[in-house]
């Protein structure tokens, strides 16, 4: 099969290779998927760069993807043959991800993909959509809440805005860094936009919420934004942190304890079985109803996978980037 891989960490152009490998066969409880689209996420280029140690001498990147089940292993019903699916955790704690013509995975990691959703769109669900879902459902429902989504034009933020609205949030506010990104967040359903490069975030949050603050903050950069939290979170509010641009996040005890705020951390790769089940059920329902919008910003052929990684690393596109094996 045609595939891409790397055998050491480093810059995309230096370490990513494209060639052929033996086509895998499914084992017990597994399915083989003919990959039609492979999603490129920030965690993919970070892992390739060396943020995590190599899990094997040779790694096929990417955890997200979509395609068609073309072969099943023992114990899997033959009704799944020919099924359109989207994939999650393709390259988490295992060496071979979705940047290949074929991938073998446990059957549960191949989720039915409705006909009204393209393979490229399906390749955006595993990390971005499930992260967004967990962020707006952690600990309590977001119905009736004022939700602040930081990085509202990002892949996760774009879905988080939509899901908060679908789940009945009273108000959704998004932070962005440009007029183009503001329009993207507004199209997702944000009720109000704050350009953090030109506006005072604390003042705008307080004004938009009549001094109440945000009941729930979906936080893309807890390291960079922790100092704002006591000034923008509502009493007994919740900050759900799924990302950070730095290794440390500092909170001043006095202001934090006065708010009664909670900060919850999670990583989508390690969701509990129950949280993932609920997320997949909600996504399936919304996809079938046509209630979700997606933004596939660019598609690269497998031969240009290094360019795809660089595009995501440099933030050149608003929306998701996929590779077509």
Image: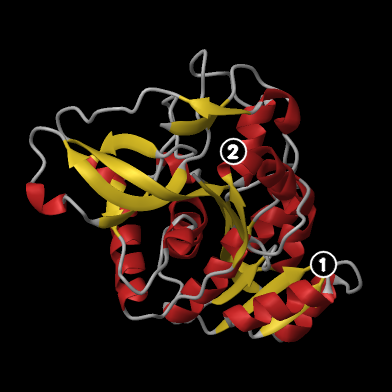
Residue 279 coordinates in the image, percent (x, y): 35, 59
**Is there any visible trace of residue 79 in the rendered image?**
yes
- Are the residues at dot 1 and dot 2 in contact (C-beta closer than 8 Å)? no
**Is there any visible trace of residue 11 in the rendered image?**
no
Q: Is residue 270 above or below residue 229?
A: above
Q: Nearer the viewer, residue 219 or 214?
A: 219
Q: CA distance from mark 1 to mark 2?
A: 24 Å
Q: Nearer the viewer, mark 1 or mark 2?
A: 2
Residue 199 coordinates in the image, percent (x, y): 88, 74
Describe the element under mark 2 as helix, strand or loop: helix
Q: Nearer the viewer, residue 272 or 128?
A: 128
Image side of residue 9 versus residue 194, left or right = left
Residue pictured at 31% horizontal, 43% vertical = 33
Per the rendering, the mark at residue 68 is none
Residue receiving disc 2: 44
Residue 75 coordinates in the image, percent (x, y): 7, 36
Residue 225 coordinates in the image, percent (x, y): 76, 54
Q: Nearer the viewer, residue 257 or 99?
A: 99
Image side of residue 314 versus residue 163, left or right = right
Image side of residue 164 versus residue 241, left or right = left
Describe the element under mark 1 as helix, strand or loop: loop
Residue pictured at 35% horizontal, 74% vertical = 116
Image quadrant of residue 213? bottom right
Query: Local crowd at mark 1 within 10 Å, few (<14), some, or many (≥20)?
Result: some
Residue receiving disc 1: 177
In the image as oriented, which residue stretches furthest toward the right? 198
Residue pictured at 41% horizontal, 38% vertical = 90
Query: Local crowd at mark 2 within 10 Å, few (<14), some, or many (≥20)?
Result: some
């Amino acid at each position: 099969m045609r595939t891409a891989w790397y055998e050491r960490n480093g810059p995309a152009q230096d370490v990513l290779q494209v060639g052929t490998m033996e086509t895998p066969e499914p084992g017990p409880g597994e399915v083989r998927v003919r990959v039609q689209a492979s999603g490129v996420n920030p965690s993919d280029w970070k892992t390739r760069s060396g943020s995590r140690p190599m899990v094997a001498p040779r790694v096929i990147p990417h955890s997200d993807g979509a395609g068609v089940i073309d072969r099943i292993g023992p114990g899997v019903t033959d009704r799944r043959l020919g099924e359109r699916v989207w994939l999650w955790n393709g390259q988490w704690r295992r060496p071979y991800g979705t940047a290949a013509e074929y991938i073998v995975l446990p059957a549960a990691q191949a989720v039915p993909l409705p006909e009204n959703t393209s393979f490229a769109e399906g390749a955006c669900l595993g990390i971005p959509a499930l992260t967004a879902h967990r962020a707006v459902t952690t600990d309590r429902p977001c119905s009736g809440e004022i939700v602040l989504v930081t990085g509202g034009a990002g892949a996760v933020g774009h879905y988080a805005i939509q899901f908060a609205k679908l789940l009945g949030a009273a108000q959704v506010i998004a932070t962005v860094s440009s007029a183009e990104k503001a329009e993207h967040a507004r199209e997702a359903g944000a009720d109000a936009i704050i350009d953090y490069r030109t506006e005072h975030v604390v003042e705008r949050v307080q004004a938009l919420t009549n001094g109440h603050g945000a009941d729930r903050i979906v936080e893309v950069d807890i390291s960079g934004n922790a100092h704002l939290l006591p000034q923008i979170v509502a009493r007994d509010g919740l900050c759900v942190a799924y990302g950070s641009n730095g290794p440390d996040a500092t909170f001043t005890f006095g202001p934090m304890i006065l708010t009664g705020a909670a900060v919850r951390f999670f990583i989508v790769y390690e969701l509990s079985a129950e949280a993932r089940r609920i997320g997949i059920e909600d996504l399936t329902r919304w996809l079938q109803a046509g209630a979700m919008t997606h933004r596939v910003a660019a598609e690269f052929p497998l031969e240009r996978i290094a360019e795809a990684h660089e595009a995501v690393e440099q933030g050149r596109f608003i929306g998701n980037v996929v590779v077509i094996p």
